[in-house]
Image: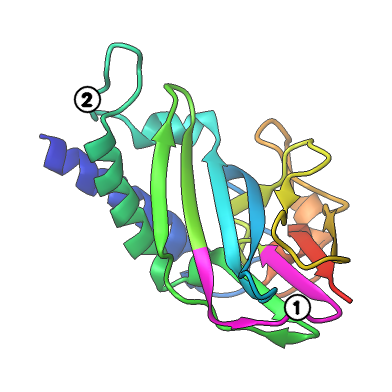
Amino acid sequence: MLKVDILRFHAAFRIIASLSIGLVGPLPALAHPHVWITMTGEILFSADGKMTGVANSWSFDEGYSAYAVQGIPTKPDGTIARETLDVLAKSNTEALDEFGYFTVVRMDGKKLSLAAPKEYWLDYNGHLMTYHMTLPLKEPIKPGKVTMVEIYDPTYFVSFSFPEDPNPVTMPTSPKGCSLTVARPKQDAQPSQNLNEAFFNSLSAGSDVGAQFSSRIVFACP
């Protein structure tokens, strides 16, 4: 029974990813989020001051979290056994691999290559499912004048946003003199927000609808 539930969870996450990236045809007027993720993160640096990657934490909305754990045995406190979560985390990571983890890193305008996560795990507190991963650069690099990290779903099937926190992203091990800012989108859809066809028709045409709602991490080093 547990194996079936794990496979169903894996399939559900894979459907989200495949619908997001593989949606046939540009349909900006029909695009709207079905899953909401609140994210926090950390920019990672090596001891010699090179950027090595990004650590992400993605908390799914309560509706999707409840769906994800349907049929999976829970403890008396509502949490899920560590070994079960480890299996789910592995499935999620495999499902997201071919889609680039919805993460783009650019340094001085040049897109950087990302490697597969070297660390990943899931937490479930009885209400929300949170996916954690450390996403490394294929090659550590000295920070440029402007580095941008974007995490978004191009078709806006999944909505990524930062919490109302003054510091949702940190970089405690960055070289001296580096500064970071988080740029939130001017428009952002929330689970309770009613987005009609007219709203999406007002967006520019094309398949990269999600980019217009992406939150950006921008940092610079001297």
Q: Which residue is drawn at 88% across and 52% down?
A: 186
Question: In the image, what residue occupies the spot 81% across and 65% down?
Answer: 218
Residue type of the residue flagged with mark 2? Pro
Looking at the rendered structure, the secondary structure element under dot 1 is loop
Which badge, 1 or 2, is on the more N-terminal residue?
2
Q: Distance between the residues labelled 1 and 2?
A: 45 Å
State left or right for residue 72 relative to residue 212. left
From the image, give the main secondary structure of the stretch colored magenta: strand
> How far across and down, in percent of the image, does residue 87 sit?
24, 47
**Number of callouts:** 2
| Amino acid on which disc 1 is placed | Pro
**From the viewer's perspective, is 107 left or right of 126?**
right
Q: Do the residues labelled 1 and 2 touch (CB within 8 Å)?
A: no
Pair 1/2: label in front: 1
Q: Residue at the left extreme?
A: 1
Where residue 143 is drawn, which disc sits there?
A: 1
The magenta region covers 135-150
